[in-house]
Amino acid sequence: MKVYHVRNILDMGTGTGILAISLQSVNTINPNFNANIFASDIDQNALISAKRNEKLNGLSEKITFIKSNLFNSFPESLKGKFDIIIFNPPYLPSIEKEDILRSEESDLSWDGGIKGFEIFLKFLDQVKKFMNFEHTSFIYYISSSKTDLKELDRKISEHRFKNEELDKKHIFFEDIILNRLTLKTS
Ligand SMILES: C[S@@+](CC[C@H](N)C(=O)[O-])C[C@H]1O[C@@H](n2cnc3c(N)ncnc32)[C@H](O)[C@@H]1O
């Protein structure tokens, strides 16, 4: 896909907004790249901080922010619209309630469920409706070696996506992996 074909990009689980803001910055320096950037998060505080960071980066009100649990509150008008979706999901397996490190406020940012990829699989259940099928659309996401990657691969395949591992970096206690999904054609 040529860069000027990219019309709409979604940053799911935007957090501080770092990825959406970086993409919006590319919009301002590359005349061939003129995509609408959308950013969503389940956490109201994350959205407040992302909007503040957008302003601090001189990009006020360029990004469309949506408060939503995955795609649940997305408007109908965004169905079939996204050429690229990025999701750095909460991807670590849950830890026990009584663990000292666990605090309810911060859970959403890292806690991907018992296996670590439950949130991501719910995302896969919903995402196809929002992808643009006029051409190949891409999903970029992060996974971790702390989860059962073989099982994740199987689930991804059951959802009829092809997974490509693009990059991998060992940080602290895990390999963090950048992946790209496209829909299988047959
Ligand atoms: C690992 S952080 C990524 C933050 C940011 N995108 C980044 O790359 O630094 C995961 C983000 O997903 C959000 N999140 C968790 N569950 C979500 C859900 N069900 N729907 C939307 N966002 C969710 C969290 O609030 C958090 O901001």
Image (cartoon, helix red, strand yellow):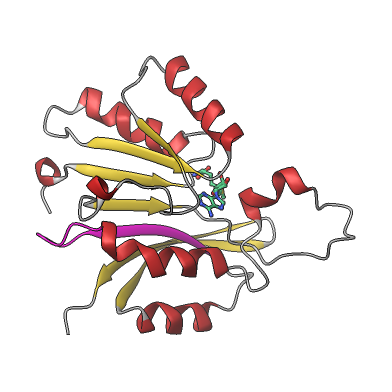
In percent of the image, x 12 and y 54: which residue is there? 1
- Residue 84 shown left or right of residue 140 in the figure: left
Q: Position of residue 55 (x, y in %)?
A: 44, 16
Q: State the residue in front, 72 or 166.
A: 72
Quarter location, residue 170: bottom right
Assess whether residue 142 is covered by the magenta stretch: yes
In percent of the image, x 40 and y 77: which residue is there? 156
Q: Position of residue 143 (x, y in %)?
A: 51, 64
Q: State the residue in front, 64 or 94.
A: 64
Question: What's the magenta region?
Answer: 131-144
Q: Is residue 114 above or below residue 142?
A: below
Report the number of numbered marks: 0
Q: Is residue 111 above or below residue 78?
A: below
Q: Position of residue 105 (x, y in %)?
A: 73, 43
Q: Is residue 160 above or below residue 138?
A: below
Q: Is residue 6 above or below residue 60?
A: below
Query: Where, quadrant-wise, is the C terminus in this rendering?
Result: bottom left
In percent of the image, x 64 and y 50: which residue is there? 108
Q: Position of residue 23 (x, y in %)?
A: 32, 35
- Residue 111 shown left or right of residue 74 in the figure: right
Assess whether residue 8 is covered by the magenta stretch: no
In percent of the image, x 44 and y 81: which residue is there? 155
